[in-house]
Amino acid sequence: MRRLKYVLQSAIACFVVAGAMLVLFWGAGIYNIYQESHGNISDLSELWSYISEQGLMFLIGLLAFVSFLVSGFQAKKASEADRAANGGNEYDGVGYGDADYSGTINAGGGYTYDSTDTSIKLDEGSGMENDRNVYGKNGMPYADIYGMTGDAQLTNTYSLQSGAIKISFDLPQRYRLIDGDDSDPAFAGFNEELKPELVYCSLQEAIDDETAEDYVLDELVEDEACPEELRTRAYLKHGVIEGRLYYYYIFKYKKSRKQRQKFAAACDIGGGLFYTIETEWIWRKEELTLEALMDFLKIRVE
């Protein structure tokens, strides 16, 4: 069910599944007709009799196709509405999960931030934001102020909520919220500027006596991309981040001639809930590590 939720939030995934359902069920029905008739049908009445026998198969395929098709258009509409709300000339700082933004995106496409010791105004795409030879008023490289590297990173605060439990975390401003559903404040997706990979964060309810370790193991076992010999509890790793015990796994694989790395982690936050993080890196030279996602792991439970 958790994986289905992610599928329904992606228009492309819904359209792909819709087509697959139609091909699968209708293909099965046509195959059954061919087998029963031995490829020899004399007239339309005989064909109709075979079709009637496979009616349930065709009906299920059609219903599945229509259902995922509608979900795809709904996901596309929601995505376009989200982009329209957040991609205009003026950003009011109000976003998914009651996020608290310290900056605004202005009509010129530049970034303007206010703080006690510096004022930055950069034109997006000028290259200045990554130029370590260009300095701000406080003598710090713009690259550090902008949040690309360094200790003085400007951040945005994001929140997830399930019931009465709310968590928040701070991300450098190079991360953008790109996938959030207002009807589900327990889920959000982010990507880093100039990089295609997504990081999904969510609050998940424990099933019965499930622990964070059980949750991560279940994700690992169900992941068909993971080599069979790695789908064991012994392969799981753990680490303590600011007093919270995370269970996680990282593995590499190759698909469509592309090198990939996958990561999933979870920790117990109380109230029968887990905080989870998932991502997949494609064709990146750097190693996917726990430290690479540290900003997502430093959470506050409110």
Image: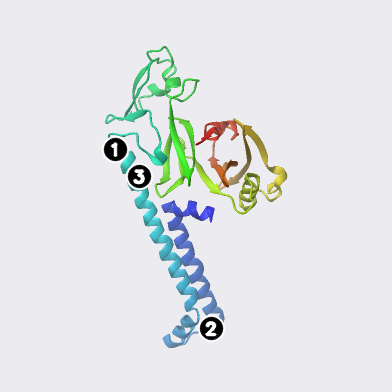
Circles 1 and 3: CB atoms closer than 8 Å: no
Label 2 vs 3, first from the N-terminus:
2
Mark 1 and mark 2 lie on one chain; the one further toward the N terminus is 2
Q: Front-most of 19 and 3? A: 3
* Residue at (56, 45) in percent of width and height: 271
Residue 174 shows in this picture: no
Q: Callout 3: 10 Å neighbours few (<14), some, many (20+)?
A: some
Q: In the image, what residue type sits under mark 2? A: Ser
Percent position (x, y) of residue 200?
A: 50, 43
Residue at which label 2 appears? 37
* Residue 280 in the image: above or below residue 170: below
Residue at the spot of label 3: 82
Residue appearing at x 37%, y 48% in the figure: 79
Q: Which residue is mark 1?
A: 88
Q: Which numbered marker is on residue 76? A: none
Per the image, label 1 sits on a secondary structure element best described as loop
Q: Amino acid at mark 3?
A: Asp
Neighbourhood count class around disc 2 (C-alpha, 10 Å): few under 14, some 14–19, many 20 upward: some
Distance of mark 2 from mark 3, alpha carbons? 52 Å
The numbered mark, 1 or 3, whose residue comes first in the sequence reads 3
Q: Identify residue type, mark 1.
A: Gly
Q: Residue at x 48, y 36 (%)?
A: 168
- Evaluate whether residue 63 shows in this view: yes
Q: Is residue 107 left or right of residue 172?
A: left
Mark 1 surroundings within 10 Å by alpha-carbon count, few (fewer than 14), some (14 through 19), many (20 or more): few
Residue 215, position as x, y percentages in the image: 62, 48
Viewer-closest of 91 and 167: 167
Q: CA distance from mark 1 to mark 2?
A: 60 Å
Distance of mark 1 from mark 3, alpha carbons? 10 Å
Badge 2 element: helix
User: Camera-side residue: 258 or 164?
Assistant: 164
